[in-house]
Image (tube, grey):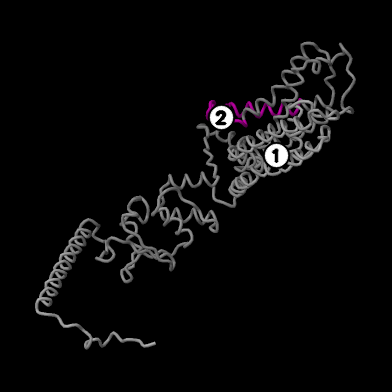
């Protein structure tokens, strides 16, 4: 195939008449005039740019409207107004970023983490919230945000999305009250505070074990009507000692707390107060009647004894794992609500279907739709007690579909809970900056 050279095309050029040459010259003069006007306009803009910026700003015609940024060899470029929309940040303030300017290369050089700057650059360009890349560790990402002086409210929003829990420490004003409050509330502050926390956990565990053991037939004594109360019973003595410790603890904390309204609004403090009420109500009833059966004859008193189980929540005060679980379920509330709605819809659907599928069968164990509720819950959760089972062919088919739907429905909250748990666990155990 022949290739025609473009370097020597003079023999093939068409000749122009004098009128055509005149028109071409006029067009060239018009183009030169436009080019000169544009060049003058650029010079005017350049001089205006230099007038508006600080004296130390090293700008030229080519770099005034755009910023060239080099982050450890990765080059970025954007218009200047993109960064100046955030004037309090490092890149948005000309005076702050000036010391990173390389006059020879006409660019700003930062020896920083490149994957993190990709997210920061996207924040400048598109706005919205800051999103951490999955490959970037959380502590490195927060360090880069601090270096580039991203707005504090944006960092706070990012920390909230990542599952950080900001704990406001409020201390009493008096030195003695402050010291006692630190001992009772913050085990990591001193050796005495750590010892108090250990004792509180041990007493709580003893109280829970005692609550379970005293319900066995070995620990239950025969109590006849009118028989006087035995105050030397070992279970009564141990329960009294545990309640005495809880009472002293909560009274001291109420006295030295920095704010009474905030103290009584805290769930953990309400648990501490509720944990000692059943003992004193039962003891008052026993002292009035002075009979051993008065503590167990009343249904309301038996219910108060069940309330003693709230002492389990006292462990959340000293257990980081239980705190992570509580924060995880609190953050996963919307996902759990979606799961609950899907579960209710499936229960209604399959309980109605199984009732009408088994209707008319003599050996049918599902006699109503409420009976179907129990069967649907047991089937969807794959428990299968076997107390109610379908008998007919259509009932067995519906039961199979119900089991499959239950497996799919139960998988809805799993990724939500897992994601929130990983975030809270990483931050609470110190793998991220809190």
Q: How far is mark 1 from mark 2, CA to CA? A: 21 Å
Q: Residue at x 81, y 38 (%)?
A: 393
Q: Give the magenta range.
A: 240-268
Residue 56 vertical placement versus 359 (above, below): below
Quarter where residue 235 is shown = top right
Q: Is-magenta flag for residue 264?
A: yes
Quarter where residue 249 is shown = top right
Residue 340 vertical placement versus 291 (above, below): below
Residue ID for mark 1: 198
Residue ID for mark 2: 257
Q: Residue at x 47, y 62 (%)?
A: 114
Horizontal placement of 272 versus 378: left or right?
left
- Residue 31 % position (x, y): 16, 69
Q: Residue at x 31, y 61 (%)?
A: 66
- Residue 387 % position (x, y): 83, 32
Q: Regarding mark 2 in the picture, which secondary structure is present there?
A: loop
Is the magenta region chiefly helix, strand or loop?
helix
Q: Earlier in the sequence, mark 1 or mark 2?
A: 1
Horizontal placement of 324 versus 162: left or right?
right
Residue 121 vertical placement versus 187 (above, below): below
Residue 289 vertical placement versus 256 (above, below): above
* Res 207 visible: no
Q: Residue at x 55, y 45 (%)?
A: 163
* Res 313 visible: yes
């Amino acid at each position: 195939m022949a290739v025609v050279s473009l370097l020597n095309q003079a023999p093939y050029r068409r000749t122009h008449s004098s009128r055509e040459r005149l028109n071409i010259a006029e067009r060239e003069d018009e183009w030169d005039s436009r080019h000169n006007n544009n060049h003058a306009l650029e010079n005017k803009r350049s001089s205006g740019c230099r007038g508006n910026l600080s004296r130390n700003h090293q700008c030229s015609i080519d770099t005034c409207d755009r910023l060239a940024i080099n982050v450890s060899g990765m080059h970025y470029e954007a218009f200047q107004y993109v960064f100046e929309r955030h004037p309090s940040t490092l890149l948005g303030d000309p005076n702050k970023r000036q010391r990173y300017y390389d006059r020879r290369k006409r660019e700003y050089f930062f020896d920083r983490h490149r994957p993190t700057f990709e997210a920061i650059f996207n924040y400048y360009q598109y706005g919205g919230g800051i999103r951490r890349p999955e490959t970037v560790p959380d502590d490195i990402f927060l360090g880069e945000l601090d270096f580039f002086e991203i707005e504090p409210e944006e960092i706070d929003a990012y920390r909230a999305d990542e599952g950080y829990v900001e704990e406001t420490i409020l201390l009493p004003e008096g030195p003695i009250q402050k010291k006692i409050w630190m001992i009772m509330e913050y085990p990591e502050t001193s050796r005495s505070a750590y010892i108090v926390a250990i004792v509180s956990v041990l007493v709580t565990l003893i109280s829970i074990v005692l609550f379970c053991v005293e319900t066995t037939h070995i620990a239950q004594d025969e109590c006849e009507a009118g028989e006087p109360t035995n105050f030397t019973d070992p279970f009564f003595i141990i329960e009294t000692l545990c309640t005495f410790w809880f009472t002293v603890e909560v009274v001291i904390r109420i006295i030295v707390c920095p704010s009474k309204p905030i103290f009584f609004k805290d769930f953990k403090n309400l648990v501490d107060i509720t944990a000692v009420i059943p003992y004193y109500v039962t003891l008052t009833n026993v002292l009035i009647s002075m009979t051993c059966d008065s503590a167990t004859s009343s249904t309301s008193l038996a219910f108060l004894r069940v309330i003693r189980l709230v002492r389990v929540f006292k462990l959340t005060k000293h257990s980081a794992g239980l705190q992570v679980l509580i924060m995880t379920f609190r953050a996963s509330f919307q996902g759990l609500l979606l799961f609950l709605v899907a579960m209710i819809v499936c229960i209604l659907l399959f309980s109605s279907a199984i009732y009408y599928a088994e209707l008319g069968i003599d050996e049918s164990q599902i006699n109503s739709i409420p009976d179907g509720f129990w069967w649907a819950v047991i089937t969807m959760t794959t428990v299968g007690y076997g107390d109610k089972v379908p008998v007919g062919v259509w009932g067995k088919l519906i039961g199979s579909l119900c089991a499959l739907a239950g497996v799919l429905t139960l998988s809805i909250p799993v990724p939500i809970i897992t994601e929130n748990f990983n975030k809270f666990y990483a931050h609470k155990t110190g793998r991220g900056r809190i």
